[in-house]
Image: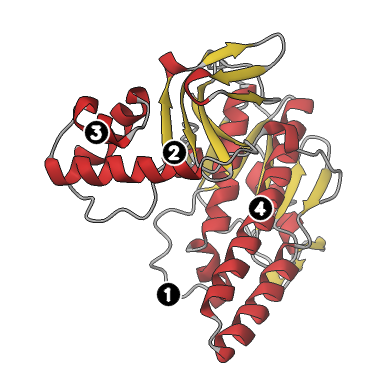
Amino acid sequence: MILTYKLRHHRDFSDELRKAKQVAEFGIKQKTLSSKDVKHIGLKSMISNQILRKYVKNKKVKSIKSVKLTIPNQGIKVEKRSRKITIPCLKLILEYQFPDFEKINQIEIGKEFACISVTIPDVETKKIDNYIGVDRNTTGHIAVVANPETGKIWKLGKKGLHIHNKYKNIRTSLQKKGKYRKIKQIKDRESRIVKDLNHKISRKIVDTAVKNNSGIKLEDLTGIRDNKKQKKSFRYALNSWSFYQLQMFIEYKAKMQGVEVVYIDPRYTSKSCSRCGLIGNRNGKSFKCICGYVDHADVNAAFNIGRSTKERDLVEGNTDTPKAALGSAKPMVQYHHPDRT
């Protein structure tokens, strides 16, 4: 499995980054893949080669805004005892705290961060019969987790909706004033906060599965985006990057721990009674069944998702880390393990 970690390098590479952009522009214009043709620009040939391969071979590239310094595996030295990564051609030393890896594939250097692509050893997925259910939400808690075997529940990410509404109001106010650059900054800030929250929640979910020797069940929400009968808030979730970011984080963290992730048919998970199986009455966050069972609607749904039911069609989850997640994976050293997020 390949993951990418971001580390702040605390160096000024503005001159090298400027030359990297010149190399890319020259390569596209002259259609050359040889570092000898861009030697006059003054960038290290090892880095120039990587940039030319990336941009010249990509025929879709029309213009270039910025180019990162790309260092291949052969230009990187690793000292695992001291947990240091050295890039001799840039005289750069990076200290890392993320988990052990087989090798570093490449490193991309930007203005502030070094994006380190590493190959992580695959862990054999454990085959078990017990699962915890995860109900993802747009209101209330971001995720509600239930263990049908023990009856225990975890409500995670209560502040998620508050964060979304807070920054949504700020953006609306800025838009009225025509401050579009500030809007971009606010969007980036919200993305970082939500990403950090999703990391914490996904880590808690996977840790819970490991501790309880369980797999993880999620609802398979693919194919239901076109259902116009869904509530507006839920349609927002289906098209929200943060909604699927949490799913991707759960998938790759689970794979690193050998935890199985499966997906179930989402029909009736929020309407069925987790005690008797009959269709009950859901009103907002309240659930009532004619059998007398009353519970929080998200908790009831989480138990339905996680319970061991043969009648549900299980869909094996894709635990290969999606490409979209690789560039955004954050260093494991920054994870926390809150009981309540």
Secondary structure under tag 1 reads loop
Name of the residue lying farthest toward the left: 31
Q: Is residue 62 left or right of residue 159?
A: left
Whole-angstrom CA distance, mark 3 to mark 2, is 14 Å
Residue at the farthest bottom position: 176
Residue 110 spot, x, y in % from top left: 50, 42
Q: Is residue 264 visible?
A: yes
Secondary structure of the residue carrying tag 4 is: strand
**What is the distance, in whole Å, between disc 1 and disc 3 at their CAs?**
54 Å
Question: Which one is nearer the viewer's eye here, 89 or 238?
Answer: 89
Task: Tell me the kind of residue under disc 1.
Answer: Lys
Q: Amino acid at mark 2?
A: Glu
Q: Nearer the viewer, residue 314 or 222?
A: 222
From the image, tell me which residue sits under label 2.
16
Q: Of circles 2 and 1, which is in front? A: 2
Q: Who comes first in sequence, dot 4 or dot 3? A: 3
Q: Which mark is residue 228?
A: 1
Contact? badges 1 and 3 (CB < 8 Å): no
- Using the image, tell me which numbered label, if any, was put on residue 135: 4
Say which quarter of the image contains residue 262: top right
Q: CA distance from mark 4 to mark 3?
A: 54 Å
Label 1 crowding class (10 Å Cα cut-off): few <14, some 14-19, many 20+? Answer: few
Residue 306 image offset from top left, x and y in percent: 67, 42
Checking the image for residue 38, the label placed there is 3
